[in-house]
Image (cartoon, rainbow, N blue to C red):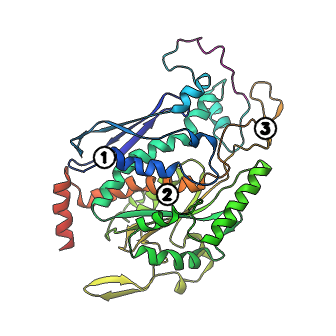
Amino acid sequence: MIRYLTAGESHGPQLTGIVEGVPAGLPITEDEIALHLARRQKGYGRGGRMAFEKDRAEISSGVRFGKTTGAPIALQMPNRAHEKDDSNWPKVLAKEGDGDDVEKITVPRPGHADLTGVQKYRYDDIRPAIERSSARETAMRVACSSIARKLLKHFGIEIGGHVTRIGSVGYENSWEDVRNIVDPLIEQGAETIFEESDESPVRCLDEELTQQMRDLIIKRRKEGSSLGGHWEVVVTGLPEGLGSFVHWDRKLGGQIAQAVMGTQAMKGVEIGQGFESGRRHGQVVHDEIIYEDDSYKRKSNRMGGLEGGVTTGMPLIIRGVMKPIPTMLTPIDTVDIQSKEKKDTRYERSDVCALPRAIVVMESVIAPVLANAFLRKFGGDSIEEIEEQYQKHNQ
């Protein structure tokens, strides 16, 4: 099974990633990983840091002559911000006391891990919580997940996402209106969705909504506030039978929800119609089954490709919500952790709206979950062995 770990701080010298469990023989290059890292850095509403960070992950082990060896894969990604803001994060090997001249941050931002980090680890300086909980960590998460994404693509499974709402601006009928735009693209494979959405500065597939979203971001930027929104990720090419209904922790929907909710600023997730299905009656929620061309099919895909925690063979549709980021130019009330006095929040360099970038992260974090479900059913130690198992399934 594929598992990855990340290490590093937002302003530390580098981010590090370890990916284990990747079968031998998978072709992978640094350029393929760089594709999604570059996509993550684009999007209207981004902060100043993206202007000078040039994210590229260096593979230092686990790959030989362009193919995985089956050993753990190590990735390294330098932080250029470490050189620009070195005083914020002292040298890793500095001796105790060397940081005495570094100003401590004692004013937590509501909605961030600032105060909870202090309460959990008993810091007298919020900086360690700020550094590790920062969304900067998702750069390495995208790099690690790109390897699982390549494994899925090798077997014809594609992932693509787009933005459906930013703040008050979005599709009037979120399910039906989005299906009218997205379903024709699905027929060409899910990567067509991200290729089309990447043409929009806010990664929205509707031109009129794109402009309205940009206008809203400009408005909130002038007010010193921030914005979140809704997103959708579609996966095509998944065979039926991935996941399980026999134990709660093997249900694929639950594992996907863990990956989504384990990502910075995500506050909700649904599969298919999700919450909307609770407002409708059963006959317009469930997907009718037919038997055609020697296989079972469904007339619709309101369940989003999952039934009972198992894939149906229909496109997998995952939707979620991202909160407005808690770093805002216009302050709100908080409390100093030392003096306990009321304070205004301090400003950390940040985006006004991170959702156009975060959609790439959401595409990425679900890839290892799906890759593991695939490997549980068709797994082997090498790509060649997995191909043999998969071909038997398709016969």
- The one of 172 and 284 positioned closer to us in this rendering: 172
Q: Position of residue 166 (x, y in %)?
A: 66, 61
**Which secondary structure lies at badge 2?**
helix
Q: Is residue 174 above or below residue 296?
A: above
Label disc, if present, on residue 29 of the rendered structure: 1
Side of 262 relative to 151 (left or right): right
Q: Earlier in the sequence, mark 1 or mark 2?
A: 1
Q: Position of residue 34 (x, y in %)?
A: 40, 47
Q: Which residues are magenta?
A: 95-106
Label disc, if present, on residue 257 of the rendered structure: 2
Quarter residue 104 falls in? top right
| Residue behind mark 3 | 334
Residue that appears at 45% across and 52% down: 365
Residue that appears at 66% across and 14% down: 101
- The one of 174 and 120 positioned closer to us in this rendering: 174
Three-letter amino acid code at the position of disc 1: Thr
Label disc, if present, on residue 311 of the rendered structure: none
Q: Earlier in the sequence, mark 2 or mark 3?
A: 2
Q: Position of residue 96 (x, y in %)?
A: 56, 12
Side of 357 relative to 160 (left or right): right
Three-letter amino acid code at the position of disc 3: Thr
* Label 1 Cα crowd, 10 Å radius (few <14 / some 14-19 / many 20+): some
Cα separation, mark 2 vs mark 3, equals 31 Å
Mark 1 or mark 2: which is in front? 1
Q: Are circles 2 and 3 on residues that touch, CB within 8 Å?
A: no
Three-letter amino acid code at the position of disc 2: Ala
Q: Earlier in the sequence, mark 1 or mark 3?
A: 1
